[in-house]
Image: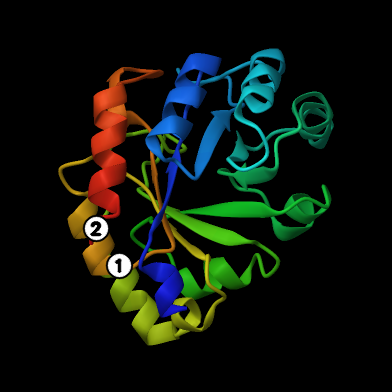
Amino acid sequence: MDAMRRKVRVKICGITSVEQGVMAANAGADAIGLVFYAKSPRSVSAAVAADIVQALGPFVTTVGLFVNETATLVQGTLRQTGIQLLQFHGDEDSAYCEQFERPFIKAIRMAPEINVAAAMAAHPKASGYLFDAWQADAYGGTGKAFDWARLSQEAAVSGSVSRSVPGSVILAGGLSSDNVAAAVAQTRPYAVDVSSGVESAPGIKDPDQVQRFIEQARSV
């Protein structure tokens, strides 16, 4: 496990074009995120997502992000795009997430009152848990960070994170090239996830920022 954690994985989320997807992959991203949430400025159609998936090939993990979506739409998107991994960022329960018979990540928004151990236990078949900042009227993509010490403290109390399989802890929320090294040093996650922190405008990834973010994330 320690050997695996020496190289933190990096997911660049909110990719909106083939060019951006290829750029992120060439910069060293392990995964790219495709947002299927109409309220997001980074939302893409299934047709565009299919082109991105096709351009990247099999060794860059493609992740489809959904928020409280109908099962019919998720299933249709899977068929049309060929995305490899699902990410549920809303209030989905375990039965909903498991019905697609596809590996999935469950986002846990770090609300003030949340019990981390209970939130993880509610989704026992998740391949990973993405810890993100909480905002009452938003499901991610806020550009805000939460107190990383909360994750360390609550994990220490419950033991749930330390006993979980490698790959379970994914850190998100307000990350950028300026703070990702400190975030990795403090929380020791399997992976980090960034979207707005490497953009020149909503939905437009900046190649220099993407490259620097990946370098900083792996510098620890």
User: Foreground: 165 or 69?
Assistant: 165
CB under 8 Å between discs 1 and 2: yes
Marker disc for residue 183 = 2
Left or right, residue 185 beside residue 111: left
The quarter of the rendered structure image containing the C terminus is: bottom left
Q: On residue 187, which mark appears?
A: 1
Residue type, mark 2 in image: Ala
* Local secondary structure at mark 1: helix
Place of residue 10 in the rendered image (x, y in percent of width and height, measured from the top left): 42, 47
Q: Mark 1 packing: few (<14 Cα in 10 Å), some, or many (20+)?
A: some
Residue 147: in sight, yes or no? no
- Label 1 and label 2: CA atoms lie apart by 6 Å
**Quick check: 1 above or below 219?**
below
> Left or right: where does residue 210 sit relative to residue 125?
left
- Nearer to us in this view, 158 or 181: 181
Q: Nearer the viewer, residue 137 or 147?
A: 147
The residue at the point 38 percent across, 56 percent down is 110
Would residue 115 appear left or right of 71 to someone viewing this image? Answer: left
Q: Position of residue 96 (x, y in %)?
A: 77, 50
User: For residue 55, what is the image quadrant?
Assistant: top right
Q: Secondary structure at mark 2?
A: helix
Q: In front: 112, or 72? A: 72
Residue at 69%, 24% in the rendered image: 54
